[in-house]
Amino acid sequence: MRRPLLDIEGLSARTADGQAVLLDVSLLMGPGEVHGLVGQSGAGKTSIAKAVLGILPRAITLNEGSIRFDGTELIGAPAATLDKLLGTDIALIPQDPMTALNPSRRIGAQLTDSLRLKAGLSKSAAMERARKLLEEVHLTDTRRILRAYPHELSGGMRQRVLIASAFALNPRLIIADEPTSALDVTVQKQILRLIRRLQREHETAVLFVTHDLGVVAQICDDVTVLFSGAVVEQTTVHHLFRHPRHVYTRALIASNPRYDQPGASLRPISDEVIADTLQSLDAKGAS
Amino acid sequence: MWYRILLNRLILAAVTLLGVAVVVFVLVRVVPGDPIAMMIAPGASEADIQDLRVRYGLDLPIVQQFTVWIKGILAGDFGKSFSLRQGVVGLVVGRVPATLELAGLALAIAMGLGVGIAVVATLARGRWLETLIDNVNGLVLAVPDFIWALVFVLVLGVLWPVLPISGRVDPRLDLDLASNFYLAEAFFTGQFKLVGHLLTHMIMPAVALALPLAAIIARVMKGALQEAMLQDYVVLARIKGFSRLRIVLQEAMRNAVVPVLSLTGVQFTFLVGGTVIVERIFSYPGIGNMAIDAVINRDLPLIQGLVLAFAIMFILINLAVDLITIVLNPRLRHG
Ligand SMILES: Nc1ncnc2c1ncn2[C@@H]1O[C@H](COP(=O)(O)OP(=O)(O)OP(=O)(O)O)[C@@H](O)[C@H]1O
Ligand SMILES: [Mg+2]
């Protein structure tokens, strides 16, 4: 691997009442790579994303580990360092497009404020750039959209706006936390393709959070499988589906709709597998 | 959409005013105290009293008195003050500007203070400053406006006399003003020295009226801001790397304003009600002060006129709040 863009090492976090949220999580991403972060609900996927963005809730504290972005340590970094990286080099595509736009500000204003404040464009230049960005995410009638309020747009359109906003300053890393889970299936596919295309064109690294292995197969290069806050498998996507090493990964693959066989039946993860996995994690923790 | 709301409100306003008119009319006639006795020298004969009673129509049955009064109002005549022997309309219209300016200044102070404190407390989230603000705020919330008025008079008027404690202007001053909106007119005609002078008279009653409202605005606004700070779009703005102050003002404020606004409207009517006693304390020549004199003198037409004036002010305040809410909410505006 070239010099890593994102280097998470030994990250551990727990809640105020002592419950572990992340256990010794390490993760490496090179520039331009798409890294999938999968696991069941509560596995800690969002917590990793939030740790990178420095927006972990108060209830969760990081005890150990480091997060380096292009060599710069993010944990405990001064606010000025973070403010400079965030938005410019690191951006987020949020999960729910219905709540991620300010209901009382026009799309144009929300799309241009980074361009003006961070890239220093004039108001008209920023508007023109915003219009181009909207075209890049395949929105038509861009002038009307720039003047519109969020409630005038559909969920899919809003997500396109948010994707445009994430790519606005050509960041090196985008974190996408289940960016399609709030959309209906046909729109999901389009949005995934869109993210994939833009990611390739801009050579942006994407940390892609999902619980859908089908999505991982479709757009990721590498993948980290999380279970209950710990990494159970970390490999290339190619490898994951051919030789799943961990019993939990195998169960997870079996429980997902077959990405290569649409319509195949689902198999829930059995309690046995979960118990096995927990045991193996305990063994690892004890050693 | 919004003109339908406006029409609705106007009909509602008419009904409200009629209701207020009936209630005040009946009320001032059933409470004890004889208006005629207040107008006449002690020891007047029974015949003289009866004479006056007839002259002012107080001998008629109450329903008839009411229709006479309402007919007059519809013709623009609210009757004549018993104690001041002048038309009620002229008296009230002459005094309303003083009260409006005082209440307006108090509202501006309350909003500035309340919003400012809420923003500071939001930025100080989880630090000692937040606790301090919460505690002081709770204290201010518990003290009514007239107590502040008395404290100010005592401290800044008597113990350490830096501010005038009575009136609206120094009576020796020769005013070059066409209207009774002294403050507004002085400001817009560029007489800034006079503006300053007026403010020294208005600042104590205005702040006294403003403090309770400021505390309420601060508390509600802080709650609304902190809730707004958790919204996804605010978190996203943080991830765009904007400063906390910009995020509070640009992202959180707008949506926090709406709940605060409707509350401020209701609370502002209380503030206007509070002018009655605060104007009295500062001998400020507004309609509140006049209302107290009118009650003492059992001046029925003047009381009725003043109560209607207050009612109209309350209705206009609520109307303004509704309109501003529509303007601030794009969903309503386009709906
Ligand atoms: N605000 C919070 N306060 C306390 N505990 C939290 C909080 N947010 C998350 N947690 C805990 O942290 C753990 C990991 O949560 P996280 O949101 O990272 O999971 P996830 O993998 O993103 O799940 P999902 O697929 O449901 O989004 C969970 O056990 C959860 O209970
Ligand atoms: Mg999550």
Image (cartoon, coloured by chain):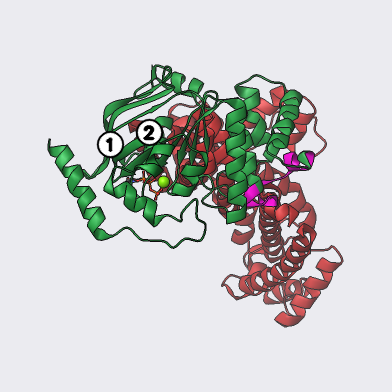
Chain colours: A green, B red
Q: Is residue B30 left or right of residue A235?
A: right
Q: Amino acid at mark 2?
A: Ala
Q: Secondary structure at mark 1?
A: strand
Q: Chain of mark 1?
A: A
Q: Secondary structure at mark 2?
A: helix
Q: Looking at the picture, how far across and down is residue B155, in whole percent?
A: 44, 32
In the picture of the structure, the residue carrying the numbered disc 1 is A13
Residue A51 shows which numbered tag? 2
Contact? badges 2 and 1 (CB < 8 Å): yes
Q: Which residues are magenta?
A: A143-156
Residue A58 quadrant:
top left
Considering depth in this image, is A43 or B216 the residue closer to the camera?
A43
Considering depth in this image, is A144 or B131 the residue closer to the camera?
A144
Is the C-beta of the residue carrying label 2 under 8 Å from the nearest atom of ligand 1?
Answer: no
Mark 1 burial class by Cα count in 10 Å: few <14, some 14-19, many 20+:
many
Asked if residue A204 shows in the view, the reply is: yes
Q: Is residue A202 left or right of residue A58?
A: right
Q: Amino acid at mark 1?
A: Ala
